[in-house]
Image: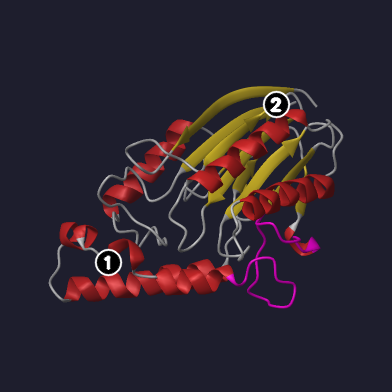
Amino acid sequence: MQITHLEAFSLGKAEDGYSEDRLIRTAHHFGVLDGSRGPGYGEADVITAIMDDAVSMMGAVPKDITLEALVEAFTALVRARKIEARFDDLRRTGGFVFCLYSAHHHEIWRVGDCKFRLRGETNAKFWRTEELCAETRAMMIRSMRYDGLSEAEIMAHEAYDQLIAAPLSCEANYLNRDDDDAAFGAIIGTAVPAPFIERYPAQSGRLVITSDGYPALFDTLADSEAHLAALLTQDPLCIGINLQCKGLGPGRVSFDDRSYISADLG
């Protein structure tokens, strides 16, 4: 299947440009890795090393690598980095999710909540635990508004970014469980249960892959950016039409890092 690359874009949520997203574009694969340092772990050096190592790995893997073998390789990489960093809690110390197109297998591969759009149809994954955390955050921020605080005052409040620290820490316990209906998958250094390793046959047409920093996907970057900008204008705290676990705040240009890559498959 011939690949005609169209657009690729990645931007961190912070004004300083730092991002835990990574774009993948090799001879045999393209897509997005979406990293997270995990709840309660503020230092960026480990997750930055993990993400950079994962990009290097993708540049070296054989074209016919299977999805299962790639997940195992990613998992081993993350586990090794965490052991090196002396992390004793694999679930709360971050990792990444991904969505990739494999040219050799003519498949779209995913672990986690990255999104893709193929031939005008979007495939998005939502975690119930994430929705609960976002709903809890919205309830707390609405309460602050009822107490008379403005949007600017809420964003500047010392507790703004820690409002749901406890629920997010609890959410991490659901990662890569195979015994709970609310569980979800990610590359964190523990085995990823088979139901969370997703593959979809690729058809000819426009394929767009993004991180979850885009609430909705469109066939062009401009349309995706315009939709995001409109949501951030209407709901900067991200408690209504764009319900999220984070919102705009001092030094931030969006609620999350965002990455977009598209191609025509022929």
The amino acid at mark 2 is Thr
Q: Which residues, given as a range, are shown in magenta?
A: 173-194
Q: Mark 2 points at which residue?
A: 26
Residue at image position (55%, 26%) is 7
Residue at image position (33%, 75%) is 139
Q: What element carries label 2?
A: loop
- N-terminal of the two: label 1 or label 2? 2
Image side of residue 78 versus residue 135, left or right? right
Is 179 part of what is drawn in magenta?
Answer: yes
The amino acid at mark 1 is Ala
User: Which of these two is toward me, 48 or 222?
Assistant: 48
Q: Mark 1 points at which residue?
A: 159
Residue 164 rendering spot, x and y as whole percentages: 39, 70
- In the picture, the quarter occupied by the C terminus is top right
Q: What element carries label 1?
A: loop
Q: From the viewer's perspective, is residue 132 above or below residue 252?
A: below
Residue 172 rendering spot, x and y as whole percentages: 56, 68
Determine the image quadrant of residue 133: bottom left
